[in-house]
Image (spheres, helix red, strand yellow):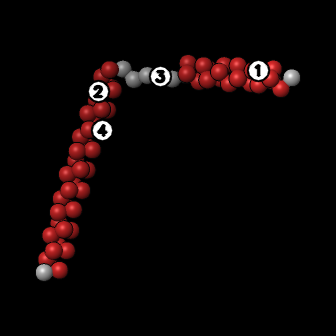
Amino acid sequence: MSEAKTKKQKKSWFKGLKAEFSKIVWPDRQTLTRETVSVLFVSVLLGVIIAVVDLAVRFGIEFIVK
């Protein structure tokens, strides 16, 4: 009896999953490209800012220690 109940729950779960996947709205190519470029630009910009702050802190600590 529990095996039949488990199979029914799995079917119900897959049915719900299929219903949720049908609600997905995928972006078009232009939107995807624009958002990808934005993410890459912000990532590179943050990397540069972190590198500059790291260099400043390193030189500051070396100046204090010497």
* Mark 3 burial class by Cα count in 10 Å: few <14, some 14-19, many 20+: few
Helix, strand or loop at mark 1: helix
**Are dots 1 and 4 in contact, CB under 8 Å?**
no
Q: Earlier in the sequence, mark 1 or mark 2?
A: 1
Packing grade of label 2 (10 A; few <14, some 14-19, many >=20) is few
Q: Whole-Å distance between the Cαs marked 3 and 1?
A: 29 Å
Closer to viewer: mark 1 or mark 2: 1
Front disc: 1 or 4: 1
Is residue 64 positioned above or below 42 on the image? Answer: below
Tell me which amino acid carries mark 4: Val
Query: Which residue position is annotated with label 2?
Result: 33
Q: Inspect the image, locate mark 3, and give the three-letter code of the amino acid beneath it.
A: Val
Q: Which residue is mark 1?
A: 8
Sequence order check, earlier mark of 3 and 1: 1
The three-letter code of the residue at mark 2 reads Thr
Q: Residue at x 55, y 18 (%)?
A: 22
Name the one closer to the observer, 51 or 2.
2
Determine whether label 1 and label 2 are within 8 Å by CB: no
Residue at 43% in and 22% down: 26
Identify the mark nearer the N-term, 2 or 4.
2
Tell me, yes or no, if residue 24 can be seen here: yes
- Which residue corresponds to the image point at 29% horizontal and 27% vertical from the top-left? 33
Say which of marks 3 and 1 sits in front: 1
Marks 2 and 3: in contact by CB < 8 Å? no
Q: How far across and down, in percent of the image, does residue 54 sit?
A: 21, 62
The image quadrant of residue 19 is: top right
Nearer-the-camera pick, 34 or 9: 9
Residue 25 is labelled as 3
Upstream in the sequence, badge 3 or badge 4?
A: 3
Distance from the alpha carbon under mark 1 to that under mark 4 = 43 Å
Residue under label 4, please give it. 39
Which one is closest to the eye, mark 3 or mark 4?
A: 4
